Image: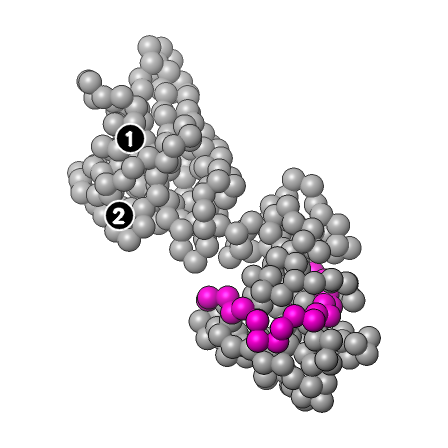
Amino acid sequence: MIEKSCGAIVFTIRREQIFYVIVEEDSGFHSLPKGHVEEGENEEQTAIREIKEETGLELDLIQNFRMVDEYVPNERPDVTRQIVYFLAEYLDEEPCIVRPDEVRSIKVLNLEDALKTLEYDGVRNILKAADKYIKEHIKGIELWDAYNRDFTKIPGETLVRGEGIPEGQYHLVVDIAVKHVDGTYLMMQRDFKKMHGGQWEFTAGGSAFKGEEPLGAAKRELSEETGITGKIEEIGRVVQDENRSLYVIYFCETDAKKDSVVLQKGETIDFKWVSREELYSFNEYELASLRPLKMVKEKNL
């Protein structure tokens, strides 16, 4: 005999990190929102109803995700329990206890803490699969390739912005310094909402996305943050073990119109072209990073 229940992995994304809703049942065990199928319901209808009854959230299910957990309980060897899980995201409204006779508490946890809280391996495996699916298919999560210290990619490993980088792995960042053919250098001022807000940057840079090669990432960052395109050449590499980051530094000489520089909303708020003397006068308190400046000085570019 099959006993069928349906539910969902309910999640939210905060500052590019995924958090999951874990329900503590009246029995004291922890689970994902779920419940038995009632007469006349299909799987999706049951999942939506159970989400609302256990968390107070009225949500739609995300398409193309469905996983099944099956097990035979020790006390009922004649029964196979089948639990179908869907995926649902909530945004502004917070989960709350609607039925205190069935739900003791609700926890909103990151993946690591959620896996520690759940008691059953089957549910843990479902959550791991959902986490992988969200990171690969749901907008709002920035994925990076994992690298070895020697700048080679680690096959099959993926890093997520906002989550810790495992020991022995690194993520890759590109810096691009821009010089005009007239001898001046382009400085971009960072948006005040970003880290190092208000400081100047020589010139552009950012993390390489999953699947990007360093040069492709450099061209994308330069275009997004300045609107400039042109020949780009690598001038150096830096390893920072303390933050597990690898930096590939590029140099671009351009003949673009100096007033054609584009500001990227949320990233940059101003720009200016400076002489070599002005460039060299910047200190660590004025610049978001000294890496490109040190490399340009070293190469006498």
Residue neighbourhood size for the residue with mark 1, other residues' Cα within 10 Å, grouped as few (<14), some (14–19), many (≥20): many
For label 2, the residue is 95
Q: Residue at x 67, y 88 (%)?
A: 278
> Where does the image place residue 69, in percent across and percent down from the top left?
42, 25
For label 1, the residue is 47
* Residue 278 falls left or right of residue 50: right
Q: Quadrant of residue 118?
A: top left
> Where does the image place residue 159, in percent across and percent down from the top left?
58, 50
Q: Amino acid at mark 1?
A: Ala
Q: Quadrant of the C terminus?
A: bottom right
Q: Secondary structure at mark 1?
A: helix
Answer whether labels 2 and 1 touch (C-beta < 8 Å): no
Above or below: residue 198 compared with residue 53: below
Q: Secondary structure at mark 2?
A: loop
Which is more toward the observer, 28 or 204? 204
Count numbered badges in the picture: 2
Q: Residue at x 36, y 25 (%)?
A: 83
Q: Which mark is residue 81?
A: none
* Residue 299 falls left or right of residue 43: right
From mark 2 to mark 1, how far is it between C-alphas?
15 Å
Which is more toward the observer, 216 or 282? 216
Q: Quadrant of residue 35?
A: top left
Q: Amino acid at mark 2?
A: Pro
Q: Quadrant of the N terminus?
A: top left
Of callouts 2 and 1, the N-terminal one: 1
Which is more toward the observer, 13 or 202? 202
Q: Which residue range is magenta in the image?
A: 238-266
> Where does the image place residue 210, in percent across and percent down from the top left?
61, 48
Q: Residue at x 21, y 43 (%)?
A: 56
Tell whether position 123 is magenta: no
Tell whether position 260 is magenta: yes
> Where does the image place residue 113, in percent across and percent down from the top left?
44, 48
